[in-house]
Amino acid sequence: MVRKAVVTAGTGGIGLETALGLAEAGFAVTVVGRNAERGARAVERINARGGEAARFLRADLSSLDEVRELAAVIAGEGELDVLVNNVGAMFADRVELGGVEGSFVVNHLSPYLLTELLLPVLKDRVVNVTSGAVVVAKKVFDAVEPPGGYYGFHWYGRAKLANLAYTLDLAHRLQGSGVKVFAADPGGAATDMTDGTMRTPKIVSPGLRVLWPLVRRTFEKSTSGPADVAARSSIIAATGEHPSGTVVGRHAVPVKPSKVAADPKVQAAVRRLSERHAPLGRVPDGVSN
């Protein structure tokens, strides 16, 4: 039987390299993205290598309604072996998506909701892509946004921290079910996000801005590698034999998870926040029960 995998934000960068790796491992890969032209090019590149035919599904994962519609399509097709939540975004200026701060939507609520809606058909594993930016995050999850001014890099890290806490919590929840859950940290790679948003000093708090040119140069050195190297952690998480709950680090080897993300109190707070802002039972506009 053909094994099926879904990779979100899989039309370019690390996501596409992850899809290519899974295709080489024998999966029939579905890549998800917003742009049909990029999707067609991604599918063409994957299929050029032979193996199971790939396909593209269009969905804007910054919209939770579109996430629900995507989940309905995938779940309606039966069992799914692997889900790789690769989607991510950083915003220089604060934006709202559906009335909720955008970074939290894209980096946490979107993969959270897609995963939860697909759990009934998932057979093997979930991989959530995390980031080293979790270390700069405010660690309070009483609300979507912490108090204080908006700084994109810190808000991105906080959303990724929420998703990492959810990942570890889900691994515990699914223990014994046969479905494994992993986090994958790709480390640095040159992507649209790092080439653009990371160049803006205002994405960090004022206390860090004086050091930002040095920090940015150091970061750019570490993100100058190719996306196919950065994708290794996701591919290993999706195909390897590590135990559920493992965080696969930037060198494609297990690393210790963040103590904050592993804290049951933080996990419970993230769970409550996620359930409040991305309820599983909500039906998208124009879709009947």
Image: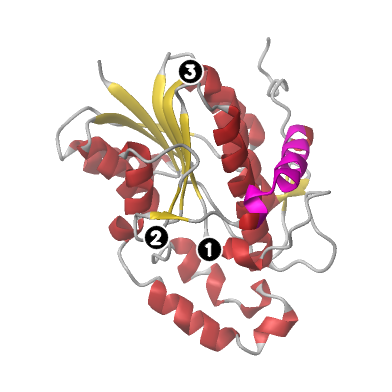
In the picture of the structure, the residue carrying the numbered disc 1 is: 132
**What secondary structure is found at the residue carrying circle 2?**
loop
Specify few, some or many for label 1: CA neighbours under 10 Å numbering under 14, 14-19, or 20 or more.
Answer: some
- Point out the stretch of residues depicted in magenta: 260-275
- The tag earlier along the polypeptide, 3 or 1, is 3
Amino acid type shown at disc 1 = Gly
Disc 2 designates what residue?
Answer: 250
Q: Residue at x 35, y 60 (%)?
A: 251
Q: Nearer the viewer, residue 66 or 214?
A: 214
Mark 3, secondary structure of its residue? helix
- Quadrant position of residue 228: bottom left
Count of numbered marks: 3
Choose the circle earlier in sequence order: 2 or 3.
Answer: 3
Identify the residue shown where x is 53% and y is 24%.
118
Instruction: Measuring from the top left, give residue 191's x and y in whole percent.
Output: 42, 62
Q: Secondary structure at mark 1?
A: helix
